[in-house]
Image (cartoon, coloured by chain):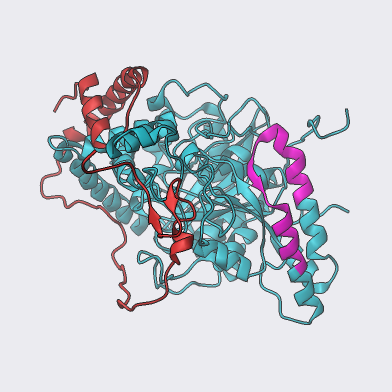
Chain colours: A cyan, B red
Amino acid sequence: MTTVGFSAAQIRDEVAAGGLSAVEVCRAALEQATTINPQLNAFNLIASERALSRAADIDRQRAAGHRLGPLAGVPVALKDNLCVRNMRTTASSRILEAYVPPYTATVVERLEAAGAVVIGKTNCDEFAMGSSNENSAFGPVRNPWVQDRTPGGSSGGSAVAVAAQCAPVALGSDTGGSIRQPASFCGVFGLKPTYGRVSRYGLLAFASSLDQIGPFTRTVSDAALTLGVIAGADRYDSTSSTIAVPDYSASLTGDVRGLRVGVPRAFVDDGVDPSVKRAFDAALDTLQMLGARLVDIDLPHAGYAIPVYYLVCTAEASSNLARYDGVRYGYRAADAREQDLKGMYSRTRDEGFGAEVKRRIVLGTYVLSAGYYDAFYMKALQVRTLMRRDYDAAFERADVVAMPTSPIPPFKLGEKTDDPLQMYLADIFTVSANLVGLPGISIPCGFADNLPIGFQLLGRPFDEATVLRAADAFERATDWHSRRPSLQGGPSGPP
Amino acid sequence: MSTDLSTADVERVAALAHLELTDAEKQLFTRQLADVLHYAEQIQALDTTGVPATAHVNVAQHERDDIQAPSLPVDEAIANAPDALPDAGLFRVPRVIGG
């Protein structure tokens, strides 16, 4: 019997009951990761030895009669921008290709304290900047459904790890859709919590007012379980909220009768691929059939989300990435000794960063520079306020807001790499949640030619419970989430 | 305002950001970022008179007491440095003064 298709909750229950050992679950996960990786390039690092040792600890704890945690023996993959002490963490960047953090991210501390077993670090767009996972110094990740397609980004490797059954749970980070969009492209659930719900300590910062960590899972109940473990205040992140963490699993009642689902019709009718539109409309029908009420809402400034997002996130990135200068950690240009200090910085950063990261640093520096600050950066922050007001008004009429996750199905690798603006425009439905700080989940809701399609539900700040409840009800009524890609003919398979 | 991004702008900004770009990168970024900025100009048509800026959505940031506590040991802090003097506990950089 293989355990790779098991949910986190199943594994936890079996391990706690003694039906499965954490070590055998871990071995199966590692084998799956090792098998798929040559084809899909989802992992930057598979930490077999450490994982097996941690799993053995769980089995020993059980044998000794200790109480096991809520994720006991559950294999977990981590996006490679989350620090783990003594485990190489690169953000898929050449500038950090040899970086070994001396500390562990709070989310990882909490997962491990709950009994989870980290199996490895997943590939992503460099410093989480990208929507296709093609901006990785270690090569693109491939979509397990159709391998010439992108898995989405930036957390593409984490989405693939879960879709290809290497782990029931993977963590990603979402700055403008980087959890929800790859979840949609890979046919799994991806949850971006409210800004401040989850500590960002130990996440390599991209845009600090937008970044949030969250899980990829194959069931909503695993997303609820994982969020319950990682959420909550942290003394190392002053933006983490002290609002009490509710029992998310208890909120999954399956009942959405009377739930008001807001649909921004004018916004979602514009520029959406017909296959996505069909799947989205069918998803709304399902929610209605379950007793939810569809409500028309208006988000007058939603159409400005892309410029606002790319002005804000690049400004923050240009500041955050100033720390990579070849002094305290990371890559330094080889001939640095012969240069002055500024020359060393500039050469190091040009050689260490990839094209998209440099493009964003230049753009961010530009919009913060004298003469352009007011016209671009400040203006964007004001429009961000208007967007918040739009959502405040929408949530007076609706309990959740529904829209497609991506306007298009997974596109071909290489299709948009020459045109950054076209790549950015495809983020139209995801970036608002980050600008406004809302929780959102991407839910599998269909296929177009064997390519997964997802839709998202956004909720009020700190109301993940309602978002999860609606997603769970949808999951119970449909079977899109249970389909798995058929992976065959891998280099490690039989000849 | 109309944005007419020039290669000289990209050079100036790259210097501010300590990025030594190749000529090919300067040309490419000028074209690509001019596209992005031109698209972004649409927000300038919105009337935002009197609208406050949202730099951060989190209204309830908490501060902790400023209490001295153990921190990263020096040897661990410099372990990732590309050029360090472990015995002295220092990062080493190219000469800054009197070169």
What secondary structure predominates along the stretch shown in magenta? helix
Residue A353 to residue B32: above or below: below
> Which segment did they paint magenta?
A30-56
Residue drawn where x is 75% and y is 76% of the image: A61
Residue drawn where x is 33% and y is 79% of the image: B67
Residue A276: name its quadrant: top right
Residue drawn where x is 57% and y is 24% of the image: A412
Residue A198 can be seen, yes or no: no
**x%, y% of residue A307?**
30, 35
**x%, y% of residue A393?**
30, 54
The quarter of the rendered structure image containing the C terminus of chain A is top right
**x%, y% of residue A154?**
50, 40
Q: In terms of depth relative to the viewer, which is nearer, A251 or B37?
A: B37
- Is residue A50 inside the magenta stretch? yes
The quarter of the rendered structure image containing the N terminus of chain A is bottom right
Residue A365: name its quadrant: top left
**x%, y% of residue A329?**
44, 49
Residue A155: name its quadrant: top right
Q: In the current view of this chain or complex, which residue is farthest to the bottom?
A: A65
On the picture, is A327 further left or further right than A36?
left
Tally the marks: 0
Residue drawn where x is 83% and y is 59% of the image: A24
- Is residue A15 inside the magenta stretch? no
On the picture, is A337 further left or further right than B79?
left
Residue A438 to residue B46: above or below: below
